[in-house]
Amino acid sequence: MDSKTTELREAHDVLAEFYAERLAGALDEMPVDRAVLGLFREWVLEAGGPGAAVGDIGCGSGRLAPYLAAAGLAPHGVDLSPEMVRVARRDHPGIPFDVADLRELPFDDASLSGALCWYSLMYLAPADRRSAFGELARVVAPGGYLATAFKAGDDTLRRGGRTLDLGIEFDIYWYSPEEMERRFTEAGFRAVYWAGRPADPTEPQPQAYLVGRRL
């Protein structure tokens, strides 16, 4: 494992309990996120039917998996951080979670009706994006869906984690919407839904959302 990946994994190991506590119930206060996730759930159900397999990729503490399962989908969470996976398994028993790298996913070819990357693509360095998006295209079946939320910006490298006062930091990229859609398109996904919202008073940047369908 390269040094940047190790740094990211170890930082998120530290963040696991912090996220589990801070983000518990957060979706209830996020109407835009719920709206986009609701569209994603409906489209995946149309594509794969009840019990359709969904990869929650970069699942963190697993907070979105119950929302997917409540619609009749079958989520399977993966995260780079072993501590995030431990917390997710503890807090959401009955839903599978495993340690995995986005660049080498533990799913068979075309085995998913949907893949959710909710604020998890922003850690990808430019050199890793082609292979990572290629992995997403490999595991999502034709007609399936890929959805992401991300911090909208100018594609500049930043250092995350510093403001939390937990002694951690890691590389992060605020994608431009144009860069995100380009990566979707090159990997074989057609954009079917775009959304965005201005930054809240506590946020330094606007948020963006994209859903694509596998060609």
Image: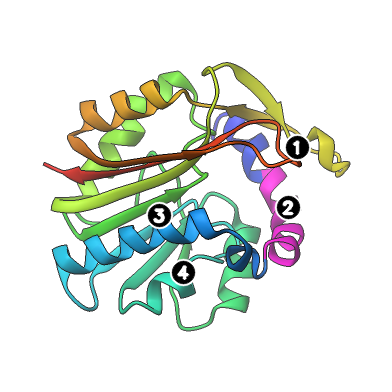
Contact between labelled residues 1 and 2, with CB atoms less than 8 Å apart: yes
Marks 3/2: CA–CA distance: 26 Å
Helix or strand or loop: what does disc 1 sit on?
Answer: loop
Mark sitting earlier along the chain (3/1): 3
Contact between labelled residues 1 and 3, with CB atoms less than 8 Å apart: no
The residue at which mark 3 appears reads as: 36
Q: Which contiguous range is marked in magenta? A: 10-23
The part of the image, by quadrant, that contains residue 172 is top right
Contact between labelled residues 1 and 4, with CB atoms less than 8 Å apart: no
| Image side of residue 151 versus residue 111, left or right | right
Q: Position of residue 24 (x, y in %)?
A: 67, 68
| Image side of residue 42 versus residue 152, left or right | left
Q: Is residue 21 above or below residue 58?
A: below
Name the residue: 32% across, 53% down: 115
Say what amino acid the circle numbered 3 marks.
Answer: Val
Q: Position of residue 12 (x, y in %)?
A: 67, 48
